[in-house]
Amino acid sequence: MMDAILPFVESTTKVLLHGPFGAGKTTLALARINWLLRRERVRGDDILVLTPQRTLAEPYRQALLGGELPTAGPPVVMTTFASLAQQAVERYWPLIAGDAGFNEPSREPNFLTLETSQYHMARLVDQAIDEGAFDALRLERNRVVSQVLDNLNKAALLRMDIDTVYRRLELAAPFSEQRAARLNALRAAQRLSHAFRALCLTENLLDFSLQVEVFNRQVLHHPWSRTHLFRSHRHIIFDNAEEDTPSAHRLVLEWLPQLASGLIIVDDGAGYRSFLGADPRRRRISRRVRRTHPSQPLLGDAGRNQTTCAPDGMAPVKAETAPRRWAR
């Protein structure tokens, strides 16, 4: 079975590899990196490993530290969408700050942590509470601070404007005795979101939501920054894609045509970070890459360890059967 998979892994193709947990998908990703470094003589920093969170890149770090992968030359780059977005905004700041609406684009940006974001938001929330904006629901101050920031973050990761998010929240408000109070609280939170965004643009502050928004709207649309970013790496390994956000999916989707190779890895039955904004459906990205299908065991003899590959434009097939054209 490994012989049937390796031609797709050890090649400069764009492959979507999916299967159950423990099927050996990350092992195959390491095989591709090893092949690129040893056989194709690709520079390490030409390869980007993108994961939803840093801990999910640990198998790749351990492979480098354990000598399983070549260590000569620049190392393979391992990052998350959030880190990549922040680094890109900082790198291309002179190009994009004016178009992003910052009051003083010539000044350096000030990237906020979670704690400093809460500090600046809390001042606005205190004022709203003093004005009685949340009296009807008796909401705690810290809960309002966290929820308004979370709404901003979700809006940015889902590539929505904040007003659309609040309209949807209003539609979801249950019909009960407290409906009017809930709607008033949502509208107060909406005003806080806009006030916080205005503060950030005035003071050159970038919380997480604004970093993502500037990256999506400015970095990926300015011709110079987009071209430079997409030339920074030639090969990508996008692991645990089902756990990542629509913003990350969109980035990879737009990057794929510029890449020499791409391997996108998905765990079937996963996507448990959806409450944090992840998109387990991954439908858009699957149209641009070769598809795979769980069918036969790849590693071990457990029936759940199954993974197979199919060529571009062809149906998922078992390794022992001849491929046929994918009916569109």
Image: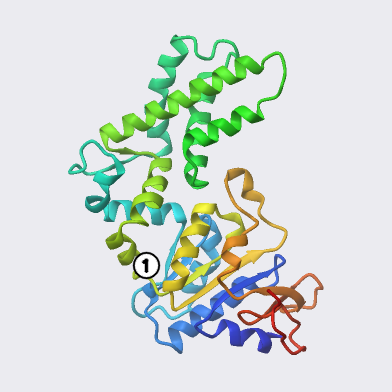
Residue toward you, 9 or 289? 289
The residue sitting at the front extreme is 328
What is the x, y in percent for residue 5? Answer: 65, 83
Residue farthest along the left direction in this orientation: 106
Pointer 1: what residue? Answer: 230
Q: Would you identify the image quadrant in which residue 315 lies?
A: bottom right
Residue 119 visible in this rendered orientation of the protein:
no
- Residue drawn at (58%, 44%) of the image: 276
Specify whether 320 is left or right of 179: right
Instruction: Judge left or right: residue 139 versus residue 198.
Output: right
Give the amino acid type for the residue marked by disc 1 in the picture.
Answer: Phe
Residue at the spot x=70%, y=24% of the render?
Answer: 174
Residue at figure coordinates x 62%, y 43% from the top left: 275
Q: Where in the figure is residue 19, as x and y percent of width and height?
A: 70, 69
Q: Where is residue 286 drawn, in percent x and y?
A: 60, 67
- Name the quadrant of the C terminus: bottom right
Let me know if residue 256 appears in the view: yes
Q: Is residue 276 above or below residue 149?
A: below
